Structure formats: C-alpha cells, structure tokens
C-alpha cells in the first residue's frame, strides 16, 4: 500500500522541517518500515524535508522485497547503507541532516559523518516514534487481528493446563497455538511463571512443573503483519487460597481503575496513578514496581509509556496496555494485562477479549 506510506512520509517531512533540517536519515528499523513498508534487518531512508525524492537503501537480500513493498521509492542497493546515504546527502547538497541519535551507536555515527562531507548532522529526536503513536485504520485492524489470535491461543491452551506440565511446555503450547492460528510468530518471548516464580514479573519459563494450588501467570502475544499483541492472564490450578484470591481481586480492581482512566487528553502519569493508588491503598505499594503499561504497534514496547512520573497526553487512536501486578516474594504473583485503544468521546476499546475473571482450571 504505497499510498499509506507516502502519506506517512509527508507527515514526517513536516517534523523534519520543524527540526530546521534539510533532510533526515531514518535508521531505526521500525521507523523505516512505518515510512516505507519494507521489513528488513538492514535498511535506512534518506527523507528530504521537501519533495518526493526520498531514497531507500538496503542490501541485496532485501532488494526484491523493497521493489515489491516500496515500488514508489528510488532504491540504492548496498551493504553499508548509512555511509552510502550520507554520501548521497553530501552529493545532493544537503546542509543540515537530522539523524536518530537515540538509535545510532557512536561507531556508526563516526562512520556516517565521515561520509557526509560538508553536511552538518543534528539529532532528530524521537519524532517518528511520536508520529507512530496514533494509529491509522489499517494499523488498528492489524493490531486487533494480533489480539484475536492471542485470545484464541489462550482459549485453546487453558483447556490443556494440568499439574505436571512444565512452564516451558505451556509456553511452547501458546507459541504453537498462535502460529497455527495465523501469527507470524510470538510477539516476544512468552512468559509462563508458576507458583513462587510468579513473583518475578519477567520470569523466563523453566522446567518447573505446575502444581495443584499454583497461580500461573502467562504473558504472551501474537505478531501479525508486523503488529504486536500483549496480554497477560493469571489462572489457578485446581484450587485457590484466600490470599491468592485477595491479590487477584486487588489487581483486577486496579486494572479496572486504570482502564476507566483512559481517555482522549488524559495525562499518562494520571492513568498509572489511578491503578497504582488502588494497590498502594491495600498496603502493597512495594509489590508493584513496574509501570502500568506501554504503547504497542510495530514494537512491543513503544510510546507512550504509562508509569509514575511519565509525561505526555494520550489521544484518540493510541493503543496501550494496562497491566498492574502484585508480586509477593517467595509466594507468587498476579498480573492482568489487556491492549486497549483510546477512543475520543467514548470509553477505551479493549482489543483483547479474554475474560478477566479468575479461572480455576
């Protein structure tokens, strides 16, 4: 869909002009994909502040894909793309070249400036990431499809959980269910944390077997046409103790508060506070130490970030996760996470639909 990417490049050009640059060198691969349609491990875009003569560079491995996915762009085929585009900027007489300083290493910066004779480099900042925050209709549908695949995988695997299965086995079942359903692959390394391991928010699955009385936290998502889903559910195996039900209900209340706070124009920090206040009031301030959520899209973690002290406002068509948790060392934990779309004039729309009630399997 070259017209979609051309429209995005025109919006990006406005940001380049605002930076007082003559052109921008886009090297962060999700940003290159967003502006061109090309998914690659080695690509960059020279985007002028004016006109339609943007220049895409990639190597021979992706030249065919570039011709297919970005047929409206002039293509340079080279292994060392940044230096090549820097030299092209100098050849075109570009005086001020903005670059993505947050993504570029010192070594790469030295290499590209050495090729950009007479060109003054200046940081572009995270302007393309800010542009990516608000999703268009095509992006929302791809993200919704990724979430549907994630929901379906949970529905399939939840029926199979039983004592004696390892965390790794459960993670593998989730991954296979997502790919069989139509996902490109898992959106990130699937987390399965059983029993005491649930107290570790980003626990890596092990051979630890599920036991009767365990809480099991599963954090996973499908990748669909480049867009990342992210959902967490905590279930009980066979039985649930009072303390487990108590923290589950606490986390569920906190999530409802965070979801209710989502609105067009709301401060990101206010959403975090709405959920965090519920957990702190229950005496568990020290057991919820990560941010409430994050944006999702071409990256699993992207702007905006919902956390204590985070600034910026949410707007219409911005998807975010809301994922409060309570983690009790050596005992276990609970996290509940959904992807929601901020919607102007209405409540946030949940793109994940799996029940948030505690399932006892």
Image (cartoon, rainbow, N blue to C red):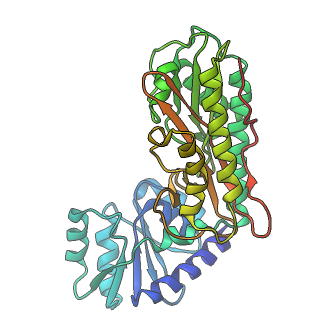
For residue 104, say whether it is visible: yes
Task: Give the x, y percent position of residue 77.
Answer: 40, 65
- State which quarter of the image contains the N terminus: bottom right
Task: Give the x, y percent position of residue 139.
Answer: 67, 60
For residue 297, say whether it is visible: no
Q: How many marks?
A: 0
Q: Residue 249 versus residue 14: which sits nearer the camera? A: 249
Q: Residue 325 versus residue 50: which sits nearer the camera? A: 325
Q: Residue 89 versus residue 235: which sits nearer the camera? A: 235
Q: Residue at x 35, y 66 (%)?
A: 102
Height in image: 335 above or below 294?
above
Q: Residue at x 44, y 20 (%)?
A: 206
- State which quarter of the image contains the C terminus: top right
Q: Residue 195 versus residue 80: which sits nearer the camera? A: 195
**On the rendered structure, is 103 left or right of 270?**
left
Using the rendered view, name the quadrant where residue 210 is placed. top right
Task: Give the x, y percent position of residue 223.
Answer: 60, 45
Height in image: 156 above or below 239?
below
Using the rendered view, name the quadrant where residue 175 is placed. top right
**On the rendered structure, is 86 left or right of 17?**
left
Height in image: 310 above or below 173?
below
Task: Give the x, y percent position of residue 282.
Answer: 57, 40
**On the rendered structure, is 36 left or right of 107?**
right
């Amino acid at each position: 869909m070259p017209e979609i990417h051309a429209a995005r490049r025109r919006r990006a050009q406005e940001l380049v002009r605002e930076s007082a640059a003559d052109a921008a060198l886009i090297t962060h691969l999700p940003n290159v994909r967003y502006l061109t349609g090309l998914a690659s491990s080695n690509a960059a875009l020279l985007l002028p502040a004016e006109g339609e003569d943007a220049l895409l560079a990639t190597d021979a491995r992706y030249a065919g894909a570039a011709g297919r996915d970005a047929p409206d762009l002039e293509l340079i085929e080279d292994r060392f793309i940044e230096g090549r585009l820097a030299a092209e900027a100098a050849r075109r007489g570009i005086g001020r070249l903005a670059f993505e300083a947050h993504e570029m290493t010192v070594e790469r910066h030295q290499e590209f400036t050495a090729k950009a004779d007479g060109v003054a480099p200046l940081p572009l900042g995270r302007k393309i990431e800010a542009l990516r925050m608000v999703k268009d209709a095509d992006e929302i549908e791809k993200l919704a499809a990724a979430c549907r695949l994630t929901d379906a995988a949970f529905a399939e695997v939840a029926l199979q959980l039983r004592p004696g299965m390892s965390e790794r086995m459960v993670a593998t079942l989730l991954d296979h269910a997502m790919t069989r359903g139509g996902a490109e692959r898992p959106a990130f390394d699937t987390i399965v944390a059983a029993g005491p391991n649930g107290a570790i928010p980003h626990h890596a699955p092990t051979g630890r077997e599920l036991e009767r009385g365990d809480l099991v936290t599963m954090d996973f998502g499908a990748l669909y046409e480049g867009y990342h889903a992210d959902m967490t559910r905590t279930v009980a195996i066979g039985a649930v103790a009072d303390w487990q039900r108590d923290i589950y209900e606490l986390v569920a209340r906190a999530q409802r508060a965070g979801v209710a706070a989502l609105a067009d124009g709301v401060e990101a920090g206010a959403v975090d506070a709405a959920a965090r206040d519920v957990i702190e009031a229950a005496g568990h301030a020290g057991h919820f130490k990560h941010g409430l959520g994050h944006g999702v899209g071409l990256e699993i973690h992207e702007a905006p970030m919902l956390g204590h002290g985070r600034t910026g406002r949410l707007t219409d068509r911005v998807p975010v996760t809301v994922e409060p948790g309570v983690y009790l060392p050596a005992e276990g934990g609970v996290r509940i996470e959904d992807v929601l779309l901020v919607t102007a004039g209405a409540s946030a729309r949940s793109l994940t639909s799996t029940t948030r009630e505690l399932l006892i399997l």
